Image (spheres, grey):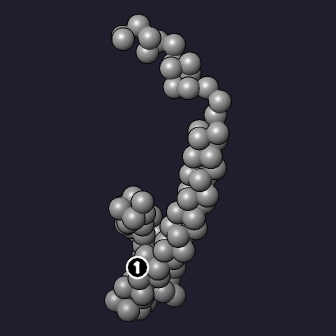
Amino acid sequence: MFRIALVVWIMLGTALAGTAMLAVLILPDLSAQAMRNIPLAVLAGFAAAMPLISRGAENRRIAGSIIRKRTVSASLSSRDRMPHARQWN
């Protein structure tokens, strides 16, 4: 779970950092001090991605526990759910 969250954070952080950098370059007031504002905007983009990823991982964990409960409590065995598996035995 941590590896997936790390990869998603890198991708989302890069997208948000790029969006923030473009905003700095497009706005004339911010582009006047671009050497100072671009690194701040990029850091803010990566920092903004962290809560989004933690929120997504929390929702994924909740959904995973619900799915596990449903599969454990299913009354049918795996052979009954997959009739095509009988052909190969």
Amino acid on which disc 1 is placed: Val
Q: How many marks can you see?
A: 1
User: Which residue is under mark 1?
Assistant: 42
As drawn, 84 above or below 72: above
Q: Is 20 situated left or right of 81 in this image?
A: left
Element class at badge 1: helix
Location of residue 67 in the rendering, given as x and y in whole percent from the top left corner: 60, 45
Residue at 56% over, 21% down? 81
Examine the rendering and report whether any part of residue 56 can be seen: no
- Of 30 and 2, nearer the camera is 2
Location of residue 38 in the rendering, given as x and y in whole percent from the top left corner: 39, 83
- Of 19 and 51, nearer the camera is 51
Residue at 41% over, 7% down? 87
Residue at 51% over, 13% down? 83
- Of 70 and 14, nearer the camera is 70
Quarter of the image containing the C terminus? top left
Residue 8, quarter of picture: bottom left
**Farthest top residue?**
87
Quarter of the image containing the N terminus? bottom left
Residue at 51% over, 25% down? 78
Location of residue 34 in the rendering, given as x and y in whole percent from the top left corner: 39, 86
Examine the rendering and report whether any part of residue 57 can be seen: yes
As drawn, 20 above or below 65: below
Query: 10 Å neighbourhood of mark 1: few (<14), some, or many (≥20)?
Result: many
